[in-house]
Structure formats: C-alpha cells, structure tokens
Amino acid sequence: MKCKTINTVCLLLVLLLPSICFSLNLKEAVEIKNIPTYIIENTSYCKLNDFLEIINCGDSWGRVENRIFILYGNDEIKFRINDKHIIYAGKNKDLNHPIKEIEGEIFIPVDDFGKVIDKILITPKQEQKTTKNKIFPIKETSISRYSLPTEFEFKVHKRLWKLLWNPSLPLGKTAEEKVVQQVAKEFSISTKAVDTINVKFAWYNQYSNKSCENMTWQEFKILRDRVGAPK
C-alpha cells in the first residue's frame, strides 16, 4: 500500500512539473519560451507580440498613434515607438536602446526591458529549442503597388474590409473615406498607403474563388507564392 502511494505521488509530480510557473528575467524567459530574437544595431530585440505572449498580456494592450499601453497585472507599462523612455508601475525608466518599428512590427530591446521588469512568471514549454538570432536590416520600406504583400499589409487589408462591410456603415464615398482614414491612423500609415494596399489585394482576387479579405494569412501566402507579385 505504501509503495502504491509513493508511485501515485511520483506520477502526480511528473504531470504537474511542466505547468509549474518559474520566476525568470526577460532574457531567460525568451530562451525558455523559444522566442526568436533579432539583432538590430548590435542589440538583441524581440517582437512586441512575443513579449506580450511571455507576460500573458496578448489581450491587454492598445496603441494610439506611436504610443503603446500594456496592462500588466495591477500595473501599466507605457512607452513610445522610437523612444528610450518607459513608464512602468508609475515610475519613469530610461532604456539604453529605443523601441523600434520595422515594416509594421514593433520590436523591444530584450536586455533593457529585462532590467525594467525584474521577474516574469512563465510556464515553460515541454519541448525546448535553441533560440536563434536573426539579422534584421534597418531600412525604410515604402508600400509599393507591385511588391509582394507583407503580413502587415494583409492585416491592414483585413481591417479595412472588416470596417467597410459593417452593416451600420452609411453608403457613400464620404463614409468610405472616413474608414480609410481610421485604418491609416490605427496602423500609423498614410491614406494613400491604405489605398495602395487595397488595390494590390484586389489584383489577387482574380486568381482565387475566395476573396483575400476572407482568407487567413497562411491561405493568402499560398496564393501569393503561387502567382507572385502584382503586375
């Protein structure tokens, strides 16, 4: 009976160990969660979306123009893109490297944020892989009518059509222009860029029975890779 009890306890420990939360700094959390890092100007960065996943705040953040707001537990994290200043738990903190936005993705410096947020509670994955650094070139990329659509452009297009198909939207050019202006503001791009993206995705619709705005990103990637860039 005693041996059976011991075996039961050991089995419970094996089952529960993968779900035990560990208190780690951000750099350790990035490695544990197998989050890709990017070398930008000789500094290790990770995507904001991956950071939000680590701290379990994927649905607790917002953006207004170049300002980012994150509700983290009972505290708030606030910062601006291209700035080295951050406010966490009501205290002002300075970073050594700025938050960056590249091709629609926001990147945060891993070591700097790790110093601001001392410890993070995470649940490690059972299968671990080595985190690889990727070289991410810094360059200003304009949205071109004839370039391959990016995931960022796909999100812009999806958002645009979600608003345009709203049954409560009044008919008329003025209402459509307001929607374009809203999308441009949400994604911090010009209305001209929104129009260019819309025309670009309309070109792909001729090659599929399913319109782009009703596709997932993976479905569209298959179509994009099959037909190439717009002509």
Image (cartoon, rainbow, N blue to C red):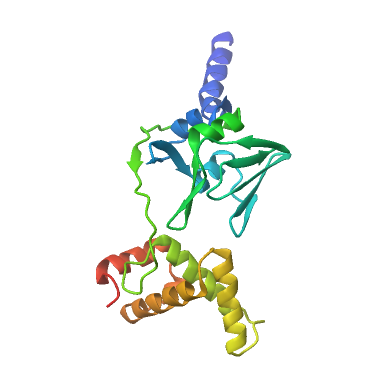
Q: Position of residue 104 (x, y in %)?
A: 46, 58
Residue at 39 percent of width and 65 percent of height? 142
* In the foreground, 6 or 33: 33
Q: Quadrant of residue 94?
A: top right
Q: Position of residue 130 (x, y in %)?
A: 36, 32
Residue at 41 percent of width and 79 percent of height? 199
Residue 207 located left or right of residue 50 = left
Above or below, 188 relative to 42: below
Residue at 43 percent of width and 69 percent of height? 215
Q: Residue furthest bottom?
A: 172
Residue 55 located left or right of residue 226 = right
Above or below, 155 relative to 181: above
Quadrant for the C terminus, please.
bottom left
Q: Is residue 123 visible?
A: no
* In the foreground, 168 or 70: 70
Residue 160 located left or right of residue 227 = right
Quadrant for the N terminus, please.
top right
Q: Position of residue 78 (x, y in %)?
A: 65, 45
Q: Quadrant of residue 152?
A: bottom left
Above or below, 227 relative to 58: below
